[in-house]
Amino acid sequence: MSDLPDQLKAARLRLGLTQAEAAAVCGVSARAYWQWEAGKSTLDVTLEGALERLRTAKKRPPRKGQNAEVSGER
């Protein structure tokens, strides 16, 4: 996987996140994230920053009755 959309998806799946959860980590809307991952948006600094946030995010253990949470530096 060499292009950014594929790298975004791989990072998201590694963390076990939905696209909406990954969007929250990246600080963008779910629609914007979907467009990045689908390759429908131009690649820019924001997208590269989002990829870096996903790469450095750490998976938190799930709390009782909740999905796993992810923390990332912004």
Image: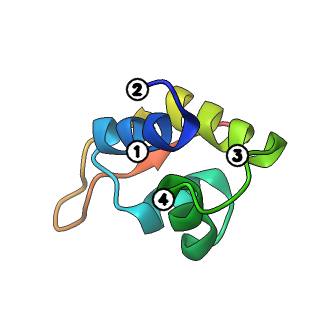
Residue type of the residue flagged with mark 1: Lys
> Do the numbered discs 4 and 2 sit on residues whose CB atoms are within 8 Å?
no
Q: Specify the label residue 9 is tagged with.
A: 1
> Do the numbered discs 4 and 1 sit on residues whose CB atoms are within 8 Å?
no
For label 3, the residue is 47
Discs 1/2, front: 2
Residue 60 shows in this picture: no
> Do the numbered discs 1 and 2 sit on residues whose CB atoms are within 8 Å?
yes
- Residue at 57%, 75% in the rendered image: 31
Q: Secondary structure at mark 2?
A: loop
Instruction: Tell me the distance, in whole angstroms, between the alpha carbons under discs 1 and 3.
Output: 12 Å
Left-right relation of 42 to 72: right
Discs 4/3, front: 4
Instruction: Tell me the distance, in whole angstroms, between the alpha carbons under discs 4 and 2.
Output: 14 Å
Instruction: Tell me the distance, in whole angstroms, between the alpha carbons under discs 4 and 3.
Output: 12 Å
Q: Secondary structure at mark 1?
A: helix
- Residue at 67%, 36% in the rendered image: 73
- Residue at 71%, 37% in the rendered image: 48
Q: Secondary structure at mark 4?
A: helix
Discs 4/1, front: 4
Residue type of the residue flagged with mark 4: Ala
Residue type of the residue flagged with mark 2: Met
Specify which label sits upstream in the sequence, 1 or 3: 1
**Looking at the picture, how far across and down is residue 23, in whole percent?**
55, 61
**Looking at the picture, how far across and down is residue 65, in whole percent?**
17, 68
For label 4, the residue is 38
Q: Quadrant of residue 6?
A: top left
Colour scheme shown = rainbow
